[in-house]
Amino acid sequence: MRKRATWLLGSLAAVLAVSGAGYAVIAQPQRGAGGQEQREAGGLPPATAPVQRGDLSSGLQVEGTLGYAQERKLNAGGPGVLTWVAAEGSAVERDGKLYEVNGRAVRLMYGSTPMYRPLKSGDKGEDVKQLKRNLQALGYGTGLDPEDGVFTAGTATAVKRWQKAHKTAETGEVAKEDIVFASGPQRVRKGDSAVGDEPGPGKPVLTVTGTERIVRFQIDAAKAGAAKPGDPVTVRLPGGATATGRIDSVGGTAAPDDKNGGAGGGGGGGGGDQKAKVEVSVTFDKPAEVNAPDRSPVTVGLTGETRRGVLSVPVNALLALAGGGFGVQVVEDGRAREVQVELGMFGNGRVEVTGGALKEGMQVGIPTL
């Protein structure tokens, strides 16, 4: 007489070896006297659940940290005493003051090339183009052609207008310590030097970020395929609110157990976990609506792979068949029978199953948890 199949214990390794899936947990059944699985009279399972047809996702949830994009340190452009710094948490826009040295303001301009030299008549380059674009945007450079990349007499006139507006010496030249170029508005994360310090050239004054909200997290390198640039995600914020977004980047391998995500981001590792981690960043669809504090812990729901229109059953409905392989117990007309199945993708507590005898709506046995 054939041996009866048994519901699987939580043996993840055994299931994964067959299915290749990554996120399944098999439930342990309740057992009665003599170690037999708990069943109702007549050999029926204690509970049932339907076979469903629909989309199945292999998504998973990871812990991350809310932050801001593009963190960097601003170094002093020249010697002197720090006489003023922008407050932590403040946002600085184009032409706004970041800090002052010896009472002289260092102002923010937009551009990707750093301010690495003084700018004066005759200079050429991308930094000159950036300066001219900013002067135009501020209303001082009417008639300038920023794309020629040349510091012309007209550029010097525009610089003098800008200097006059700020009540500084109208030299028509821009000193290296007058400007910091950044990609856009900057948020002051923290001060690295205090008023009265003498930071000196190359010493950090402020740590700044962009103003766009992002989430950073780490994921096991083995599961990195679940996070692809452009994939949609759902972020659960402090207080229970949710926000939608997309994966912006999947970076290089991070050090194990680095809960700060290298660049200030979030949740991987811990408890001696030495698995290699990959850093991932997420941008929001509506970042202006995300109001939680900086460095708040969040939960990111990754969509992962999706199978369309597949049959699936609860993971804990799986049976380990006596002859090998896996099956489910189909309950019909007050009777139960075992049906062998092939396993597909796991996701959200369910598993994709295929087998000629299975149909949508059938009831399959599950243990009492």
Image (spheres, helix red, strand yellow):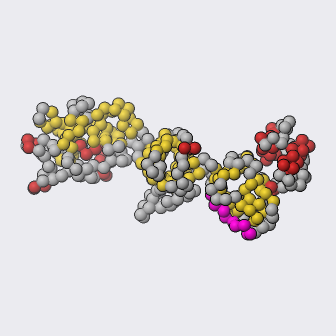
**Quarter of the image where the N terminus is located:** top left
Left or right of 271: which side holds 30? left
Residue 162 sits above or below residue 274 on the image = above
Q: Residue at x 81, y 64 (%)?
A: 102
Left or right of 125: which side holds 58? left
Secondary structure character of the magenta stretch overall: loop
Q: Position of residue 369 (x, y in %)?
A: 22, 50
Q: Residue at x 41, y 46 (%)?
A: 60
Q: Position of residue 26 (x, y in %)?
A: 27, 49
Q: Position of residue 324 (x, y in %)?
A: 21, 44
Is residue 195 shown in magenta?
yes
Q: Nearer the viewer, residue 263 or 137?
A: 137
Is residue 280 shown in magenta?
no
Q: Nearer the viewer, residue 338 or 58?
A: 58
Q: Residue at x 32, y 44 (%)?
A: 349
Left or right of 59: which side holds 360? left
Residue 325 sits above or below residue 9 on the image = above
Q: Residue at x 81, y 59 (%)?
A: 104
Residue 287, quarter of picture: top right
Q: Position of residue 243 (x, y in %)?
A: 49, 43
Q: Is residue 10 visible?
A: yes
Left or right of 112: which side holds 362? left
Provide the residue span drawn in magenta: 189-197
